[in-house]
Image (spheres, helix red, strand yellow):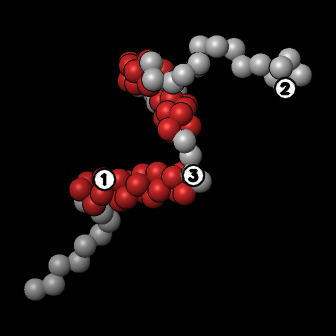
Amino acid sequence: MNITKFGQTDFEKKAEETQKSREIVAEILNFGVSQQQILRIAYLLSLELENIDAMKNVSQCIKTYIEGLEEPIKSVIET
């Protein structure tokens, strides 16, 4: 008896999403980013979360580790 399979199971979909996420992280790391850049990227990604509570909690947590995030960034002309 042959079983024909159509589509993906929920487990397969989650596994594929996880693999894509890991590939994205690997690509970012290939740029040679610093620890502060990793934190800033994580912060900026946290702001894209649709769940407002998750966005607030994650961004606030990451914000505590980013040096000078609260300081206004001066332009090249001002320095």
Q: Is residue 47 above or below residue 29?
A: above
Instruction: Assess disc 2: are there few (<14), some (14-19) or many (≥20) residues with their C-alpha within 10 Å of its C-alpha.
Output: few
- Relative to 3, 42 lies left or right: right
Q: Does dot 3 land on a helix, a strand or a loop?
A: loop
Could you tell me residue 34's position as x and y percent? 54, 42
Residue 13 shows in the view: no
Looking at the rendered structure, the kind of residue marked 2 is Val
Write down the residue under mark 1: 14
Q: Does dot 1 land on a helix, a strand or a loop?
A: helix
Looking at the rendered structure, the kind of residue marked 1 is Lys
- Relative to 27, 71 lies left or right: right
Residue at left 30%, top 57%? Answer: 15
Could you tell me residue 46's position as x and y percent? 47, 30
Q: In which quarter of the image is the C terminus?
A: top right
Instruction: Assess disc 3: are there few (<14), some (14-19) or many (≥20) residues with their C-alpha within 10 Å of its C-alpha.
Output: few
Of 29 and 9, the residue lying toward us: 29
Q: Earlier in the sequence, mark 2 or mark 3?
A: 3
Q: Earlier in the sequence, mark 3 or mark 1?
A: 1
Please state which of the two labelled residues, at mark 3 or mark 1, is closer to the viewer.
3
Could you tell me residue 19's position as x and y percent? 37, 58
Write down the residue under mark 3: 32
Looking at the rendered structure, the kind of residue marked 3 is Gly
The residue most toward the bottom is 1
- Relative to 17, 73 lies left or right: right
Residue at left 77%, top 19%? Answer: 74
Instruction: Assess disc 1: are there few (<14), some (14-19) or many (≥20) residues with their C-alpha within 10 Å of its C-alpha.
Output: few
